[in-house]
């Protein structure tokens, strides 16, 4: 049952956190406020791809990165990030805004539910060989076999570690900007 929940979580994450926002990004080309929010989302959700690459190589830090992504995504959707300030409401006058608001709510709920499912997987950082941890690693390994089978998992893992460093700088900048906004120092 647990393996099935993990697989469903992976599939829903792909549909809700990859496919749907790609469609919304295409529809928001002429809607700068929505496009800005979606670009902030994509910067935050890039941590999910980093997580998948880390899991393909079996690196335990993937479990921490995955949980962090599930926290960062709703924050970026509702508050923006270092490069985009999401202050103000999304205009209500067109269909793209309505779809965006629906998707943002659904993505936020999904991230919360998925976080509840994945929090116990943090044990895999210290005990990656357990059956539960192997279940968490199965969908990314299957994705690797289906998409880029010629790429070495270790190379993907190394690239993900480098990307994680870059992401850490982005996250620090986003947190610093949020702190300045809270103090009222941000222009």
Image: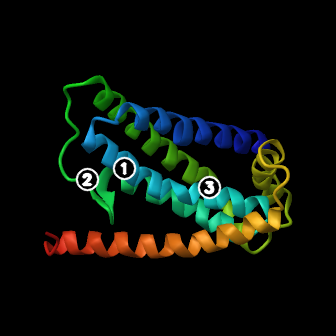
Q: Which residue is mark 3?
A: 49
**Quadrant location of residue 132?**
bottom right
Residue 122 in sight in this render: no
| Image location of residue 46, percent across then percent down | 54, 57
Q: Position of residue 21 (x, y in %)?
A: 47, 38
Earlier residue among tags 3 and 2: 3
Crowding at mark 3 (Cα within 10 Å: few <14, some 14-19, many 20+): some
Q: Residue at x 81, y 51 (%)?
A: 141
Q: CA distance from mark 1 to mark 2?
A: 8 Å
The residue identified by callout 2 is 86
Q: Which residue is mark 1?
A: 77
Q: Is residue 63 left or right of residue 69?
A: right
Task: Decide if residue 85 is in sight here.
Answer: yes
Residue at 55 percent across and 60 percent down: it is 47
- Please tell me whether mark 3 sits on a helix, a strand or a loop: helix
- Would you say the residues marked 3 and 2 are in contact, meaning their CB atoms lie under 8 Å apart? no
Percent position of residue 38, x then y:
38, 46
Q: Residue at x 66, y 64 (%)?
A: 63
Give the crowd class for mark 1: few <14, some 14-19, many >=20 residues within 10 Å: many
């Amino acid at each position: 049952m647990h393996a099935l929940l993990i697989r469903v979580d992976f599939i829903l994450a792909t549909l809700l956190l990859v496919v749907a926002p790609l469609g919304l990004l295409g529809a928001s080309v002429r809607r700068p406020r929505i496009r800005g929010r979606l670009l902030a989302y994509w910067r935050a959700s890039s941590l999910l791809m980093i997580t998948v690459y880390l899991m393909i190589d079996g690196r335990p830090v993937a479990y921490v990165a995955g949980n962090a992504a599930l926290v960062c995504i709703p924050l970026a959707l509702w508050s923006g990030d270092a490069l985009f300030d999401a202050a103000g409401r999304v205009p209500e006058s067109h269909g793209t805004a309505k779809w965006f608001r629906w998707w943002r709510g659904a993505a936020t709920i999904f991230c919360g539910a998925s976080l509840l499912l994945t929090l116990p997987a943090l044990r895999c950082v210290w005990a990656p060989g357990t059956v539960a941890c192997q279940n968490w690693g199965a969908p990314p390994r299957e994705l690797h076999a289906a998409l880029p089978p010629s790429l070495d998992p270790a190379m993907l893992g190394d690239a993900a570690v480098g990307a994680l460093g870059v992401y850490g700088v982005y996250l620090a900048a986003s947190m610093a900007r949020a702190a300045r906004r809270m103090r009222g120092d941000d222009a």
